[in-house]
Amino acid sequence: MRYKIYTENPQSHVLTIEMVVENIAADRIKIQIPAWRPGRYELQNFAKNIQHFEVVDEHQQPVAFHKVNKDRWKVYTKGLSQLTVRLQYYAYIKQANGVFANAGSSYVDEQTLYLNFVNCLPYVSGRMNEPHEVQLDLPANYQVACGLPYVNGSVVAEDYYQLIDAPLLASPYLQQQSYEVQGVSFYVWFLGDYQPNWEKLLPDFQRFSEKQIQVMDGFPEKEYHFINWILPMPFYHGVEHRNSTMIVLGPDAEGDGLYTDLLGVSSHELYHAWNICKIRPVEMMPYDLTKENYFYTGFVAEGVTTYLGDVFLKQAGVFDLQAYLQEFETTLKRHFEQDGLSKMSLLEASFDLWLDGYVPPVPHRRVSIYNKGAVVAFILDTLIRQKSQHQCSIHDVMRLMYERFGKTGIGYSLEDYIAVAEEVYGDSLETYVSTCLAGNTPLETQVKELLAWYGIDFAWQPNTSLHFALLDAQNQNLIEWLG
Ligand SMILES: [Zn+2]
């Protein structure tokens, strides 16, 4: 499949997209635009951004088609071996605060081309596994940040799935530096009115990348790109991809606060390179981009990643103890203060991501797979550490998950995750599963007891503020846990 993307008027934020389909052998083909994108498990129906859709043959003559549903077109191809699908895509989103793009959208103006191909590139049903090439008409002074190589004006992917897992940010104003860990090249890109302190940033990034690779026993990719777009308005959004992450943060004037956010989101997204990009729920093998892909393990994908993203920053020496505990306190606060009375279990919340996972829920209904997921990951980590006297931890669970379900590309089920956790724990985790995952009883007492083991007092009553008190910074369990 060959695509061409260009804009006749960047100020209009409209992209023209042409897809040339060759070697047509059937009387009909189906053209589809994704209804959602990996990383956010809700229908976004990108087809609603298409202003105009047409199909022409080699002589630019119209080819008959009709729309089968909201984002699928049936094209009548009898006697044709080649055709071109042409569409106009409105690459701009309207959000509060004047924010015009997020980490999963597309955008164009006079000095920026930002593409999440999953938004705007149609595919031919049944031919997603063929190589896909995108030709971009970029001015000579543009630089390109992308997980796929940009060569001679084109990006080439081995299949559609690889293509849509590689967001692209192009502009004459990109800044970039790189570092290396165990033969893997890491590139850090910035766009925006922001001057990174590279002398601090590069060693910090190197430390948490090294720690993650060491704990997970190798990295799945040959290179990795942190693609950051810093906006003048408050914003916080990151999306994980195979060998890159797209991050949109703001405000650019925030200084240290912005840098702490950058570290947090970067460590989180890098861990996703294992946890969900490789260690993927079996229900999404492969992704079905036409409809909901229900799964019960959103709490593994996001909860474990939220918990470990920050833990890695401490274990790598990027955060000090106070900085880490502040982040963890915030996670607990969010869970207990916002979701403490919710009726839903974590498994139900994972399944219902597609319903209201990313919008404000009605009161006392939903729990956050991020926050409660992180709390139960902490509980599992601590149960394993207590029983094994720190010989094992949640790291062993995730490393085994990578070994068995990630490297093999077979995907995992809820039962697989529980079985691996029990194997590492060395006993049944029935009570953990029934209370923390399948139940909705409050977890304060358990969290308080476990934190006490690390020498941390945890005080919270409904309607009062939650806070930690570090009773003993030399507590041996605390040192074993956070390094
Ligand atoms: Zn995440």
Image (cartoon, grey):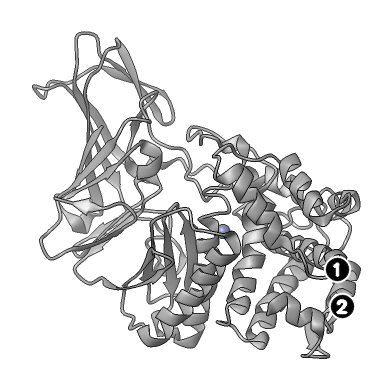
- Residue 167 visible, this orientation: yes
Tell me what residue is drawn at x 53 percent, y 69 percent. 267
Closer to the camera in the image, 229 or 163: 163
> What's under tag 2, amino acid-wise?
Trp
Give coordinates of residue 330: x percent, y percent.
69, 76
Q: Reply above or below: 229 against 16.
A: below
The C terminus: image quadrant: bottom right
Within 10 Å of the Cα at label 1, are there few (<14), some (14-19), or many (20+) other Cα atoms? some
x and y percentages locating residue 323 in the rendered image: 63, 85
The quarter of the picture where the N terminus appears is top left
- Judge left or right: residue 28 versus residue 404: left
Nearest to the observer: residue 65 or residue 469: 469
The numbered disc on residue 453 is 2
Q: Position of residue 300 (x, y in %)?
A: 67, 53
Which corner quadrant of the image does residue 414 belong to?
top right
Residue type indicated by callout 1: Gln
Q: Nearer the viewer, mark 1 or mark 2?
A: 1
Q: Secondary structure at mark 2?
A: helix
Q: Are marks 1 and 2 in contact (CB under 8 Å)?
A: yes
SS category of the residue bearing label 1: helix
Left or right: 46, with 304 as reference point: left
Query: Residue sitting at 31 percent across and 79 percent down?
Result: 193
Residue ID for mark 1 = 386
The quadrant holding residue 72 is top left
Q: Residue at x 32, y 30 (%)?
A: 130
**Residue 360 seen in this snapshot:** no
